[in-house]
Amino acid sequence: MARSVLAALLAIVLVPAVVLTNVAAWSLRTILDDDAFAATIGRSLDTPAVEGLIADRVATVVVDAIDLGDPLERRVGALALGLVPSIGAAGLEAAIESRVLTALQDPRVESARDQVVRAAHEFLLGAARGTDGVVRLDGDEVVVDLYPVVVQAAGAIDPRLLGVVEQRVTPAEAQLVVARSDQIQAVGTGVAMLDAMRIAIPALTLLVAVLIVVIAHRHTRALGIVGVAAMIAGVISLGLVWVTGATAPTAIDNGTLQEVAREVYGELTSTLVLQSLLVLGIGAIIVIGASAALRSRRGRTLAPNRSATMGGPTT
């Protein structure tokens, strides 16, 4: 009786252990690896929502650099872009924004963008303690300095704009608030914990699974229980991805940034979704295998009994 109770308790522990192992493996492959993180975020930055946000910010900064309050400056800026000198402020900004969308494909702009992404990764792994750099804390807000992207985009639009931006735009004017510091610190702390436990969690999960099978009286049935626990853990992992994806972006006030956060989250968790489906599938295979083994054993047990009954003395 005691062994059965202990095996049942271990089966309950196994479910969160498998979930944590799944998340730890995902973070190791996606969050903790600098190249993988940069590639994943890079894919999300190529989506229309993110490109539109960057283009809007760059256009605003460039137009401010031209100084719309001075008609002569505006005419010079318009001529540099091949536009009618009498174009208004709104028209000038719209024209620049459309050209920024094209400029974002320029290798120089992509290189500057990748530098920002890698800086964000370094900031995240540092548990959001940085107060300077491309990504930094400003009070209770996390800001991203898009100055390198702005400069390279301006140069890609027209070389004459490059000098104007370099002379008149400061990093503070090109920064973008992306989140609250407590949100990023919570994420950074969680990632650091997963990093520290990336070996201990899988080892603990394997130990619990083995103990369930060894302790239980019926090993094959216990193996089936392990499979069920894995299936439950896979479903829970998928549920966590869905719930977090539905709720986390709403903590961001800016509607455009919410869309960007969803894009980034979707790219980052796509691997976790696949892993969760794999865990679910492996659990199902274990359950099916254990069930087949039990049926086979019962068949072998019943067969001798039938033979003995059929071959017995008759009257």
Image (cartoon, rainbow, N blue to C red):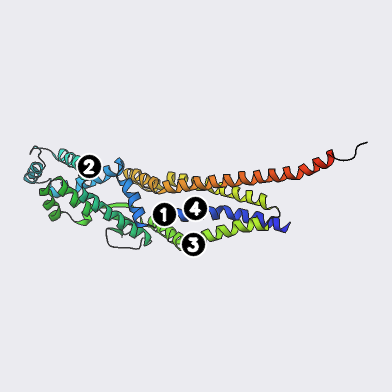
Please name the residue that numbered disc 1 is placed on.
Answer: 29
What is the CA distance from the residue labelled 2 to the residue labelled 1? 31 Å
Q: Which residue is mark 2?
A: 101
Left or right, residue 72 beside residue 142: left
Instruction: Name the residue at 62% across, 45% down.
Output: 289
Classify 10 Å Cα crowding around label 3: few (below 14), some (14-19), many (20 and above). Answer: few
Pointer 2: residues within 10 angstroms few (<14), some, or many (20+)? many
What amino acid type should be assigned to the residue bearing mark 2? Leu
Residue at mark 3 to residue at mark 2: CA–CA distance: 44 Å
Label 1 vs 4, first from the N-terminus: 4
Residue depicted at 66% across the width and 58% down the height: 214
Pick the front one: 143 or 68: 143
Q: Amino acid at mark 3?
A: Ile
Left or right: residue 38 versus residue 22 is left
Q: CA distance from mark 1 to mark 3?
A: 14 Å
Can the viewer see residue 239?
Answer: no
Q: Residue at x 14, y 55 (%)?
A: 166
Question: Which picture quadrant has residue 31?
Answer: bottom left
Asked if residue 271 is positioned above or below residue 202 in the image, the reply reads: above
Residue with the mark numbered 4: 22
The total of numbered circles placed on residues is: 4
Three-letter code, disc 4: Asn
Q: Which mark is residue 178?
A: none
